[in-house]
Amino acid sequence: MSTVSLKVEFSGGLELLFNNQRQIKLDLPAQADASEGRPADVRYLIHWLKDNRLKERPELFVENGTVRPGILVLINDTDWELEGEEEYVLENGDDIVFISTLHGG
Amino acid sequence: MSTVSLKVEFSGGLELLFNNQRQIKLDLPAQADASEGRPADVRYLIHWLKDNRLKERPELFVENGTVRPGILVLINDTDWELEGEEEYVLENGDDIVFISTLHGG
Amino acid sequence: MSTKLAKDDFRRYGRQLILPGFGRTGQEKLLNASVCVVGAGGLGCPALQYLAAAGIGRIGIVDHDTISLSNLQRQILYRDTQIGELKVEAARSAIQAINAGLKVDLYPCALDASNSQDILSGYDILLDCTDNAPTRYLLSDTAVALGKPLVSGAALRFDGQLATYNLGDGPCYRCLYPKPAARATMGSCEENGILGPVVGTIGTLQALEAIKILSGLHDGAPTLLIFSALTVPSFRSIKLRRRKPDCVACGQNGKRRDLIDQSDYVAFCGGENPDYERL
Amino acid sequence: MSTKLAKDDFRRYGRQLILPGFGRTGQEKLLNASVCVVGAGGLGCPALQYLAAAGIGRIGIVDHDTISLSNLQRQILYRDTQIGELKVEAARSAIQAINAGLKVDLYPCALDASNSQDILSGYDILLDCTDNAPTRYLLSDTAVALGKPLVSGAALRFDGQLATYNLGDGPCYRCLYPKPAARATMGSCEENGILGPVVGTIGTLQALEAIKILSGLHDGAPTLLIFSALTVPSFRSIKLRRRKPDCVACGQNGKRRDLIDQSDYVAFCGGENPDYERL
Ligand SMILES: [Zn+2]
Ligand SMILES: [Zn+2]
């Protein structure tokens, strides 16, 4: 089965939900849905992380099928809004960051 | 003639020798020496920059055939000493930074 | 009516005056500018000292809080002997000691929907140095209503974030975060801790951002800087979206001033923070 | 003999004590640690204030200079009323006001080959907050001879650099720069200018680096951080070479103490800097 190699990072406290890991390397299945052949996109990555890597309190990561309010997703150092958000199709070598907005000061 | 596409950056005051440009994009000839077929390496880039882009005082950039003392070369965010220094063969998409060490405080 | 540099100013600001692209014009822009710093805590202290030292003509400080012992680990304008005093007063003494020529205006109150436009309308640039989500939304909405750039810093544990909102066609805070995070996900420095130089770095960079905007050195591109003291690389610059046409604050049908009047910011953000400082 | 936290320390340092991986052990390491800051100028001032606030037990300050009006734009520990006073004395007053429990030792002299080992041998970590190449080589050679990490900051115009030398198997300053740059290429803040929060950011990050090393949070990887206020990304982290086996200072046949005795650092770096401050 072909895969897509990613670097995934967590910041702003989200690392605490992922066993205090700030950076992980992943080989994600290149097809989100083997029967229909939908390529792996950011929506799929979010769900894959929730099912396979999240260690606690999923409600602090996912809400209504996407990341919860207050989380920003960065695709290769660009706001995911400029890249198609959940629809962005992942490519080998992509660097995806999940960051929780901070309020402290 | 084939070329290699680079991002070249200047920092720490070196930008002042290059018309105050901090970042330039270059298409460098892929062969440093057409007759012998030597591929373009960092040594070639240094000389090409000196001959084609340097605007003033070459002695502040080049000395004894390489960069002058006090300049550090960074290849894709790594100290060039770890990448073979002048011998490093350039690849498409490489990001080369020339930085002058600062003494102020 | 613009003030010119005095004779002593050429000596005091000499190291800035000779900078390429800054010069005498840049310094006169700072001298004639006003900046309001909302929050005189871990972010506000370093921001205030570098704004004052750089010669910003008028500085406003908004904070209702008094100095406590647990502040001193990071709020570097305050002294052991000032515990219990108002932060705004102690901050003014500290920055006027650096630069006696400064005009400093104090607002020893909490910023809320009833006073934010009055307090902030007289300033060129606003700094968000606050520590809670409701005030961050209120400040952003006020910056949009008044048409002013908002240099926003935040820090927690080993991490920091910096962005300038409402600058040119860049986004506002609500463009990025239309819905607040659940209260359970919002850490505070009281609950989660903070390292002094982490919040100090972000506050110092807020002053830099304001100076760049005022002196004309800012490129106007909307960028989020994220910092973590424990990773390599420790800083990343993120290219941000433009203003969102459907943003309830700054979008084409944005409600602007009405939004502020109609919002209960504390309820919107999930209710009051527990007050750990008093426990 | 290690000092334990006092009752008040739990309140003062509470925001650090609750940090994951830091805790009471981390705070006690700081309390029992000593850091020497060489240079009490634009880098030294913010470094000193954050080291003091964080509770480093003993701080040394080395600087021969007095305060002048042109310092105040960036050297934020000093006041209008202190012009002409020794920087080390004014710096001590400022940081003891933040944290009265600190032990502070002053060295109101220029660091040179005859005194550097005596002055620096009693400290755990050295901070290079100096403003000239000869002192930077001397400090690096001394750090190698004494086997101590050297947290080195530098800044000019809109740019800054930060690296920790001689940490683990990381390089020393001479491993990176075996030969000094020509005098003509060495800018100084007097000649070329500096923006306050640029040097402030680097100085603050030097304090952070020292705190990370002392508390055990540093990963030990040799890294150079480069900063420019005018580019995006504004920060980059560069992976550095390891210690060089043929380095004249720290290499296998490195001369260490002898090198310091035999070197004329000023001549090595092309002679005296012109003293712009006095002109
Ligand atoms: Zn908006
Ligand atoms: Zn060495």
Image (cartoon, coloured by chain):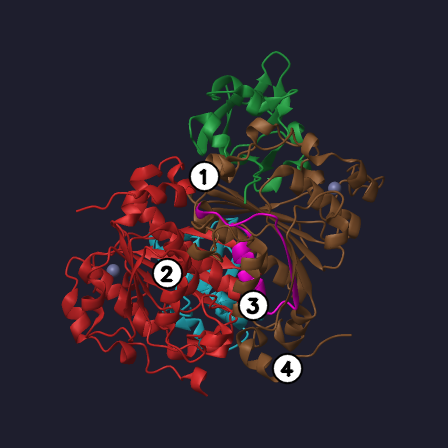
Chain colours: A green, B cyan, C brown, D red
The earlier-in-sequence mark between 3 and 1 is 3
User: On the same chain: label 4 and label 2?
Assistant: no
Chain to which mark 2 belongs? D
To which residue does mark 3 refer? C96
Quadrant in the rendering for residue C80: bottom left
Give neighbour class at mark 4: few <14, some 14-19, many 20+ (Cα, 10 Å): few
Answer with left or right where residue A63 lies relative to residue D30: right
* The stretch drawn in magenta includes residue D135: no
Q: Which residues are magenta?
A: C42-69
Disc 2 is placed on an element classified as helix
Residue C193's label in the rendered image is: 1
Q: Position of residue D80 (x, y in %)?
A: 50, 74
Chain ID of residue with mark 3 = C
Picture disc at residue C6: 4
Which chain is indicated by disc 4? C
Label 1 to label 4: alpha-carbon separation = 44 Å
Does residue D143 appear in the picture of this structure? yes
Q: CA distance from mark 2 to mark 1?
A: 24 Å
Badges 3 and 1, same chain:
yes
Mark 2 and mark 4 in contact (Cβ < 8 Å)? Answer: no
Q: Amino acid at mark 2?
A: Gln
D265, D70: nearer the viewer: D70
Which disc number belongs to residue D96? 2
Q: Residue at x 71, y 53 (%)?
A: C167
Q: Residue furthest right?
A: C253
C-alpha distance separating marks 2 and 3: 19 Å
Q: Quadrant of ligand 1?
A: top right
Q: Give the percent coordinates (x, y) of residue D17.
A: 38, 39
